[in-house]
């Protein structure tokens, strides 16, 4: 289990709190307490499925008591409202930062909306920072790959966006990046992961390098030497 607050990994320590049944099935609240001593916040999901009371342990659980098979049908995160992600570096342009933050905030409620925002965010990064020609997203991805300016791992990660998103089956993901369309499993999360890698490559590392150069030039200036060219 990964804590949605601090992103720490910990062994499951779930608690079930049965609610009731409605026309759509049985409902319960699933609660995890983060084991990280610096966090200790609870992660709360509302779930549908088959829930039974275990009298021996005095607790509710999902599925058959004897087999222990989990029969949860759906899980929706309700606390926190969105899974925490790394804070966007200050060096990232505001327009890109806005789309990325919104894509993170809506992920728990709509993977489709999150993926649409992250595709649009990716297109902005490639146009503003990679200098690709404006066109379809798949073509822009291919252009930056053909430039051979990206580290191998990052290039493979960007290329995987087309495959994970199944652009062939959903061509509008390629042409109208902000459109709400069906998503593949883990597509929305993968897009956000790749954007974080791009932020580091295009903004964080160049910013750190420039700060080091500026610091060196300041030292050179105090000793009467010319700055680095």
Image: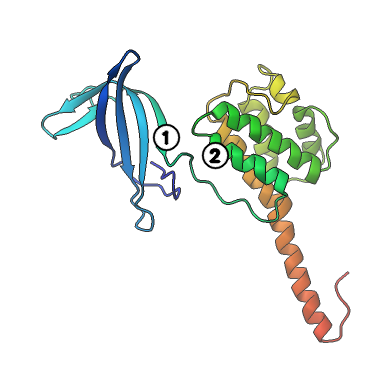
Considering every residue shown, the one lying at the far bottom of the view is 223
Residue nearest the viewer, comparing 39 with 211: 39
60 left or right of 36 in image: left
Nearer-N-terminus badge (1/2): 1
Label number found at residue 184: none
Residue 152 makes an appearance in the image: no
Q: Secondary structure at mark 1?
A: strand
Where is the C terminus found, in terms of image quarters?
bottom right
Per the model, the C-alpha gap separating discs 1 and 2 is 12 Å
Image x and y of residue 199, in percent:
68, 48
- Badge 2: residue crowd in 10 Å (few <14, some 14–19, many ≥20): some
Q: Quadrant of residue 194?
A: top right
Q: Is residue 48 left or right of residue 130?
A: left
Tell me what residue is drawn at x 40 percent, y 47 percent.
9
Nearest the viewer among 63 and 80 is 80
Which residue is nearer to you in this view: 59 or 64?
A: 59
Residue 118 horizontal side relative to residue 123, left or right: left
Q: Is residue 159 above or below residue 27?
A: below
Q: Residue furthest left?
A: 56
Mark 1: few, some, or many residues within 10 Å (few <14, many ≥20)? some
**Label at residue 105:** 2
Quarter of the picture holding the N terminus: top left
- The mark found on residue 77 in the picture is 1
Task: Please tell me whether mark 2 sits on a helix, a strand or a loop.
Answer: helix
Q: What residue appears at the point 21 percent right and 30 percent down from the top-left corner?
A: 60
Task: Tell me where residue 76 appears, x and y as whole percent.
Answer: 42, 30
Residue placed at 76% from the left, 64% from the top? 210
In x, y percent, where is residue 50?
28, 20
Q: Residue furthest top?
A: 23
Residue at x-position 65% and y-position 33%? 117
């Amino acid at each position: 289990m990964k804590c949605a607050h601090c992103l720490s990994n910990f062994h499951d320590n779930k608690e079930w709190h049965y609610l009731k049944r409605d026309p759509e099935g049985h409902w319960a609240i699933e609660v995890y307490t983060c084991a990280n001593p610096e966090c200790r916040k609870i992660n709360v999901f509302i779930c549908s499925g088959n829930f039974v009371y275990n009298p021996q342990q005095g607790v509710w659980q999902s599925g058959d008591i004897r087999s222990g098979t989990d029969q949860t049908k759906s899980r929706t995160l309700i606390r926190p409202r969105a899974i925490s992600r790394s804070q966007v570096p200050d060096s990232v342009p505001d327009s890109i930062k806005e789309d990325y933050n919104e894509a993170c905030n809506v992920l728990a409620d709509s993977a489709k909306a999150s993926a649409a925002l992250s595709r649009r965010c990716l297109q902005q990064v490639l146009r503003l920072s990679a200098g690709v020609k404006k066109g379809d997203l798949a073509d822009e991805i291919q252009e930056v790959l053909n430039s051979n300016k990206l580290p191998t791992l990052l290039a493979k990660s960007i290329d995987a966006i087309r495959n994970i998103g199944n652009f062939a089956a959903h061509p509008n993901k390629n042409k109208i990046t902000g459109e709400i369309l069906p998503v593949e499993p883990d597509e929305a999360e993968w897009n956000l992961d790749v954007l974080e890698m791009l932020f580091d490559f295009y903004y964080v590392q160049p910013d750190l390098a420039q700060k080091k150069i500026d610091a060196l030039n300041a030292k050179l200036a105090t000793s009467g030497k010319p700055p680095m060219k």
